[in-house]
Image (tube, coloured by chain):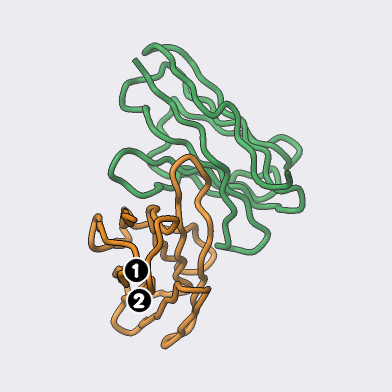
Chain colours: A orange, B green
Amino acid sequence: ILNVEQSPQSLHVQEGDSTNFTCSFPSSNFYALHWYRWETAKSPEALFVMTLNGDEKKKGRISATLNTKEGYSYLYIKGSQPEDSATYLCAFSSGYSTLTFGKGTMLLVSP
Amino acid sequence: DTGVSQDPRHKITKRGQNVTFRCDPISEHNRLYWYRQTLGQGPEFLTYFQNEAQLEKSRLLSDRFSAERPKGSFSTLEIQRTEQGDSAMYLCASSHIPGELFFGEGSRLTVL
């Protein structure tokens, strides 16, 4: 059974704060690590797909890092905005298998 | 709209009734996935199709659940004799590259 853990479970920050979340996953049989953003009443939206140890990816104010040897990934949001409020999901893939998701981190950004 | 579409978006049913959800994937995607998300959990894998072939099923998919993808296009997920524990968001996703999933907005099921 693959175990993907995310922390914190929820987070409430003020507009302008920077924040980060953690995703831990099995370090063996690693193929890819995905980050998704899921806003209420919308579909989960892919943010990043990361495959190489040491990968760093960036999209606007959001960035992510990957450490496959120790089995963790960080997602950073710089200068949080209310529109960043969503649940952030990470998902682990060990090859051609399906994705195994964590429970997500629910972010609320107050103006 | 060329994204993944799911129907219905919401379904309320009484325990013991059958329900069916439909998913229309992105047209050029040959892979289609069903996931279920319950309160406080991340999406949990249910089943996966490549074209019309159902290649993988989770042990979560009891014999009351059946999924089809005739002709390798749209897919249906049927739940027979619904139970209150079936209340969840049922998510469909499609892809043409392994693991890179595009999700629909989900079908929320409430079993009374």
Q: Choose mark 1 or mark 2, whichever is in front.
A: 1
Is label 1 in contact with label 2 (beta carbons under 8 Å)? Answer: no
Within 10 Å of disc 1 (Cα), the crowding (few <14, some 14-19, many 20+) is some
Residue A10 in percent (x, y) is at: 25, 55
Residue located at (53% from left, 26% from top): B78
Q: Badge 2 is on which residue?
A: A28
Q: Is residue A6 left or right of residue B96?
A: left
Label 2 secondary element: loop
User: Tag 1: residue type?
Assistant: Gly
Tag on residue B71? Answer: none
Asked if badges 1 and 2 are on one and the same chain, I answer: yes
Within 10 Å of disc 2 (Cα), the crowding (few <14, some 14-19, many 20+) is few
Residue A7 in percent (x, y) is at: 24, 63
Position of B22 relative to A38 (above/below): above
Quadrant for residue B104, please give it. top right
Position of B21 relative to A90 (above/below): above
User: Tag 2: residue type?
Assistant: Ser
| Sequence order check, earlier mark of 1 and 2 | 1
Q: Is residue A103 left or right of residue B23?
A: left
Residue A18 in percent (x, y) is at: 32, 72
Label 1 secondary element: loop
Q: Badge 1 is on which residue?
A: A16
Quadrant for the C terminus of chain A, please. bottom left
Q: Could you say which is closer to the camera, residue B63 or residue B36? A: B36
Residue A66 in percent (x, y) is at: 39, 80
Spatial CA span between label 1 and label 2: 37 Å
Quadrant for residue A26, please give it. bottom left
Residue located at (46% from left, 60% from top): A36
